Image: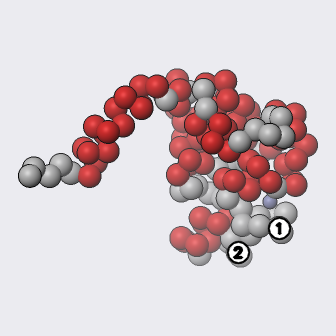
């Protein structure tokens, strides 16, 4: 059996998926922000604290949960007002992160309005 490097294997299995992912229609800066939200490798408190011991804790400034992608996009009360301007309450995290272009743009818009630099 010929073994492909993990990276190659990933690329092959994701080729078709990538073409359909509207992520690639975003500008470079927007892609960076969204990529960080998708992967969890971002400047939000949980990752910074757990991985780098930067900051005082993994908690969000709201004090209710760790600051993660899901917290800021779905739950955090600090961003409730901005969130409600952009999405219906039923909007799902997966749509915000992996939906069609119009949905991804909403997420970028949310970050801008909320002043979040993930
Ligand atoms: Zn919060």
Q: In which quarter of the image is residue 54?
A: bottom right
Find ligand 1 in the image and state its quadrant: bottom right
Q: Which of marks 1 and 2 is nearer the N terminus?
A: 2
The disc at residue 57 is 2
The residue positioned 71% from the left and 76% from the top of the image is 56
| Number of numbered discs overlaid on the protein picture | 2
Q: How far apart are marks 1 and 2 (CA)?
A: 12 Å
37 lies above or below 96: below
Residue 40, image x, y percentages: 56, 55
The disc at residue 46 is none
Q: Nearer the viewer, mark 1 or mark 2?
A: 1
Question: Judging from the image, what secondary structure is the residue with disc 1 in?
Answer: loop
Within 10 angstroms of label 1, few (less than 14), some, or many (20 or more) residues? few
The residue positioned 53% from the left and 26% from the top of the image is 22
**Front-most of 108 and 15?**
15
Q: Residue 60: in sight, yes or no?
A: yes
């Amino acid at each position: 059996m010929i073994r492909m490097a993990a990276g190659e294997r990933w690329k092959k299995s994701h080729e078709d998926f990538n073409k359909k992912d509207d992520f690639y229609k975003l500008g470079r800066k927007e892609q960076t922000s969204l990529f960080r939200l998708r992967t969890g490798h971002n400047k939000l408190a949980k990752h910074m604290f757990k991985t780098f011991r930067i900051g005082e804790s993994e908690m969000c400034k709201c004090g209710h949960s760790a600051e993660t992608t899901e917290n800021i996009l779905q739950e955090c009360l600090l961003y409730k007002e901005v969130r409600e301007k952009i999405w219906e309450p039923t909007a799902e995290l997966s749509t915000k992160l992996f939906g069609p272009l119009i949905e991804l743009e909403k997420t970028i818009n949310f970050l801008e309005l909320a002043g979040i630099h993930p």
